[in-house]
Image (cartoon, rainbow, N blue to C red):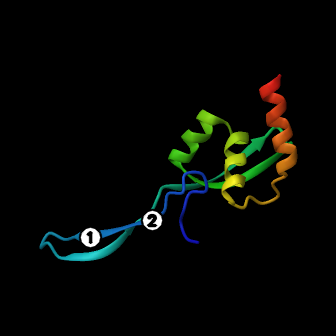
Amino acid sequence: MGAYCQVTGKTAMSGNNVSHARNHTKRRFLPNLKIHKFWVEAMQRFVRLRISTQGLRTIDKRGIEQVLLDLNARGEKVLGLNITALENAVKGKDNG
């Protein structure tokens, strides 16, 4: 798939360029995507995600571990993600 945020699901929108003479031509509005590496303490490794700036705010608010668990529940593929280790670490963090 093309430009989309793995966390929020934002995709490209379509619209029109409008010239001074009010001619309309089709265009695409792309989301502000960045490729960012996050350190996941539970797995002792980096995870690379293609996310929007709103996705960064979501990760700051909820935490990378919880966001990765939600991605897995949604069926999103993240390269090399060990879900069992991540789930155990999140459960231990909640209990401790």
> Type of residue at label 2?
Ala
Toward which corner of the image does residue 72 lie, by quadrant?
bottom right
Q: Residue at x 82, y 50 (%)?
A: 83
Q: Position of residue 42 (x, y in %)?
A: 83, 39
Q: Nearer the viewer, residue 57 or 62?
A: 62
Q: Nearer the viewer, residue 5 or 85?
A: 85
Q: Residue at x 31, y 76 (%)?
A: 26
Q: Residue furthest left?
A: 21
Q: Is residue 10 above or below residue 42?
A: below
* Residue bearing mark 2: 12
Q: Position of residue 60 (x, y in %)?
A: 61, 35
Element under label 2?
A: loop
Toward which corner of the image does residue 12 lie, by quadrant?
bottom left
Q: Residue at x 56, y 47 (%)?
A: 55
Element under label 1?
A: strand
> Type of residue at label 1?
Asn
* Residue bearing mark 1: 17
Lateral position of residue 28 relative to residue 88, left or right: left
Q: Residue at x 46, y 58 (%)?
A: 31
Q: Position of residue 41 (x, y in %)?
A: 81, 37
